[in-house]
Amino acid sequence: MTKEEMKKKLEVSKLAIFGGSPAFPEKLHVGRPNIGDREVLVRRLNEALDRKWLTNRGPLVQEFERTIARYTGVKHCIAMCNGTIALEIAIRALGLKGEVIVPSFTFIATAHALQWQEITPVFCDVRTSDFTLDPSRIEELITPRTTGIVGVHLWGRPCDILHIEQIARKRNLKILYDAAHSFGCSYNGRMIGCFGDAEVFSFHGTKFLNSLEGGAVVTNDDDLAKKIRLMKNFGFDGYDTVIYIGTNGKMNEFSAATGLTNFEAIDQFVEVNRRNYHVYKRELAGIPGVHFVEYNEREKCNYQYIVIIIDETKTGLDCNSLVKIFHAENVLVRRYFYPGCHQMEPYRSFFPHAKMLLPNTERYSPRVMSLPTGTSVQPEQIVAMTSLLKYLLRNADSIKSTLKKA
Ligand code: T4K
């Protein structure tokens, strides 16, 4: 749909939510996979099949680990089957127990990875500049049971690493960063991956760099890396000797082949994401009540998430209604991350009063909207989507009253 076609459609009664046909014939997604050279991928897959070595630290997994470690400038990369298992293993290997401070404004996996091991996630509020952990709220949450901090580099924006590390050092706490969104991003000129005691990437299909499913722990700590390697392979040290508790967190060769092939295309992915980001930024500038979450372009960014915050008092339509309208038009915007982990089970029942300590999370998570981008989204589609948004907001009153009647 072009801007002109969109203009013709723009009439309240013709909106798909009120029975019109969707503006976009094909669904537009947040998180459509970025895919590298298919021929190279097929060659790698065939080589793995010919070798008949499909998993258990095969040559492609080892190459993938070396590639990630080199790129992020970190000593060790331990590839895993997904980011959640990587978080769980890192948490266990770091010896975290008791209570761990973590944002609620994140994907549920961050909290679950703790609770899964009967560690209490203590939810800390986020700052409004980038919606990552607010360092000024961490210390008040520390108790004698606190063993660590899990920061999340949300949407590829790094946490306030400097301050978090100062607090952790002073209070003798471990730091793990959930860097699921942040492969290819930097902080003060150093790549995300080399901070804290360890960091965890996700290479899920929806991530900037995907290996179908996949994840990794990266760390500069030799002993920790050794422990994590054992843990992700049942604790085996040689054929018949198990020297540690472990699980099965291994990445397979097909995932590594995909990860390596996609890695070779990351400069193109960044270029497309950056182009899309600037089209959105231009088109969404100056709309009252629509706050566009920017990247710090002095750093390396992957531009994988386009996020806006809706202030209903100025837009006239709330985020919930906008999401429903967009979905009807085949624009599958997502609410990453609503309503905050503390509002989801089991945390909602465990900590019914958590929200009192999370004013920013409570205020902003219901207003957040991630918009389609990535290599499957073209600039003209962005212009059409943003024209639709502008039209909706210009006609908020009549849409609201029609929604009420519907
Ligand atoms: N920490 C953080 C901060 C995270 O965001 C995540 C994962 C993790 C930890 C855990 O990492 P992993 O264990 O996942 O490696 C998706 C992803 O499944 C999840 O990886 C991701 N975060 C989260 C933010 O998003 P859903 O349930 O929202 O995904 P789903 O199936 O609704 O797909 C999202 C959109 O992408 C849809 O519009 C469809 C599209 N899509 C998806 C897939 C899988 C495609 O077009 N093709 C595909 O192959 O969780």
Image: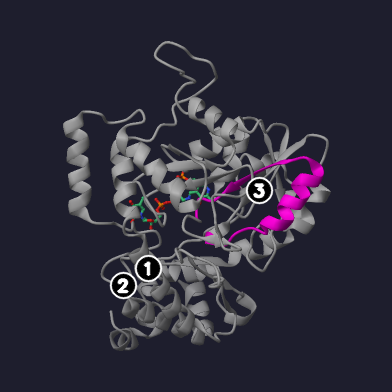
Percent position (x, y) of residue 27?
31, 65
In the depicted view, which residue is nearer to us: 356 or 377?
Answer: 377
* Pointer 1 or 2: first along the chain: 2
> Which is more foreground, mark 1 or mark 3?
3
Mark 3–mark 2 Cα distance, whole angstroms, equals 35 Å
Say which residue label 1 marks. Answer: 328
Residue placed at 30% from the left, 72% from the top?
24
Percent position (x, y) of residue 200?
53, 45
Instruction: State whether residue 94 is above or below residue 102.
Output: above
In the depicted view, which residue is nearer to us: 280 or 367?
Answer: 280
- Where on the picture, by quarter, is residue 79? top left
- Where on the picture, by quarter, is residue 28? bottom left
Q: Which mark is residue 342?
A: 3
Q: Is residue 157 left or right of residue 79?
A: right
Q: Secondary structure at mark 3?
A: helix
Residue placed at 37% from the left, 43% from the top?
64
Percent position (x, y) of residue 124?
72, 51
In the depicted view, which residue is nearer to us: 356 or 139?
Answer: 139
Mark 1–mark 3 Cα distance, whole angstroms, equals 29 Å
Magenta region: which residues? 156-181
Callouts 1 and 2 close, C-beta under 8 Å: yes
Say which residue label 2 marks. Answer: 22
Amino acid type at circle 3 is His
